Amino acid sequence: MAVDHTALARLDPALERSRQSAAKLLNRLAGKLRIQQTAREAAIGVKQASQYAHSQPMKDMGTEIGRFLRRNPVPAISIAVVAGYLAARSWKTAKKPDRP
């Protein structure tokens, strides 16, 4: 039986295109799964925070938040700066007169 060496040369580009197509499909699927996993983790975090908030008295939560802020001042200051910036932008937008 004779081996057709040209058949392999013709199949090679088709196989490479199939491999690239499969790789793209798998990359898209992996991206979607990461988004779904992140959304699930966020939902679980929100649920846990809600359960915590409902189970703790306000005074205890305030004490714990104060402890967290004293132990981690940089994130607390960063959050305050961003919140202040967003509030100022919101205030500025709300105060802007309508132009005809």
Image: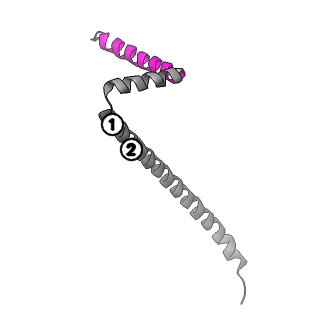
Q: Which of the labelled discs sits on residue 69, or is there none?
A: none
Q: Amino acid at mark 2?
A: Ile
Check disc 2 and report the residue beneath it: 44
Judge whether 79 appears above or below 5 on screen. above
Q: Amino acid at mark 1?
A: Ser
Q: Secondary structure at mark 2?
A: helix
Judge whether 26 appears above or below 73 on screen. below
Badge 2 local density, few (<14 within 10 Å), some, or many (20+)? few
**Do we see residue 72 in this rendering?**
no
Q: Overall secondary structure of the magenta stretch?
A: helix
Examine the structure image and report whether residue 86 is included in the region drawn in magenta. yes
Q: Secondary structure at mark 1?
A: helix
Q: Position of 38 compared to 13: left or right?
A: left
Check disc 1 and report the residue beneath it: 50
Residue drawn where x is 59% and y is 59% of the image: 20
Q: Nearer the viewer, mark 1 or mark 2?
A: 1
Distance from Cα at disc 1 to Cα at disc 2: 10 Å
Q: Position of 4 compared to 71: left or right?
A: right
Quadrant for the C terminus in the image: top left
Residue drawn where x is 40% and y is 23% of the image: 63
Q: Position of 81 compared to 10: left or right?
A: left
Residue placed most toward the observer, 29 or 51? 51
Residues in magenta, as a range: 74-100
Q: Residue 13: x percent and y percent? A: 64, 65
Count of marks placed on residues: 2
Residue placed most toward the observer, 69 or 4? 69
Q: Residue 47: x percent and y percent? A: 35, 41
Q: Dividing the picture into quarters, in which one does residue 9 lie?
A: bottom right
Quadrant for the N terminus in the image: bottom right
Q: Which numbered disc flags the more N-terminal residue, 1 or 2?
A: 2
**Do we see residue 17 in this rendering?**
yes
